[in-house]
Amino acid sequence: MNLSIILPIYNEAENIDKVIKIIELEVKIPHQLILVYDFDEDNTVPLIDKWQKKLKNIRLIKNNQGNKKGVVNAIKTGFKAVIGGAIVVTMADLSDDPKTINQMFEKIQQGIII
């Protein structure tokens, strides 16, 4: 089973390196990390280029919900970009502990819906 981690971003230049490092360190399941942004001027976007050169599992996608911006619509765009498998949404401010993704994925594989 595949795992996609959707990460809505908005001017997270101060946090994004730490967030990606922690996710890559803590999440033991092979995964793709889908970062979704609203505006070309988002200060996070230039930093993602460097990560995409290092890690092939990172995708940067612009929110495609028309004029509808914000976290909910970024998540919707992320869902549309997923190609099968399990999906986890987490926030770029690390308010969600990436360690729990391993536990959630294990439950999904066991058929336990959480």
Image (cartoon, rainbow, N blue to C red):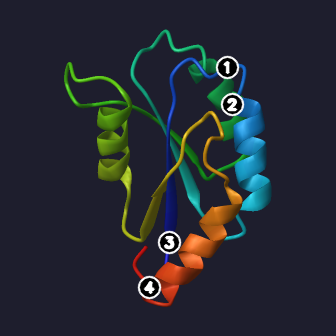
Give the SS element for disc 4.
loop
**46 sits to left or right of 39:** right
Relative height, residue 85 to residue 48 (above, below): below
Label 1 crowd (10 A; few <14 / some 14-19 / many >=20) = some
Q: Nearer the viewer, mark 4 or mark 1?
A: 4
The amino acid pointed to by label 1 is Ala
Give the SS element for disc 2.
helix
State whether residue 9 appears in this view: yes
Distance between the Cα atoms at labels 4 and 3? 16 Å
Relative height, residue 103 to residue 69 (above, below): below
First in residue order: circle 4 vs circle 2: 2
* Mark 4 and mark 1 residues within 8 Å of each other at the beta carbon: no
Give the percent coordinates (x, y) of residue 2: 50, 72
Residue at which label 2 appears = 16
Give the percent coordinates (x, y) of residue 108: 47, 80
Residue at which label 4 appears = 112
Relative height, residue 10 to residue 7 (above, below): above
Distance between the Cα atoms at labels 3 and 1? 28 Å
The amino acid pointed to by label 2 is Ile
The amino acid pointed to by label 4 is Ile
Distance between the Cα atoms at labels 2 and 1? 6 Å
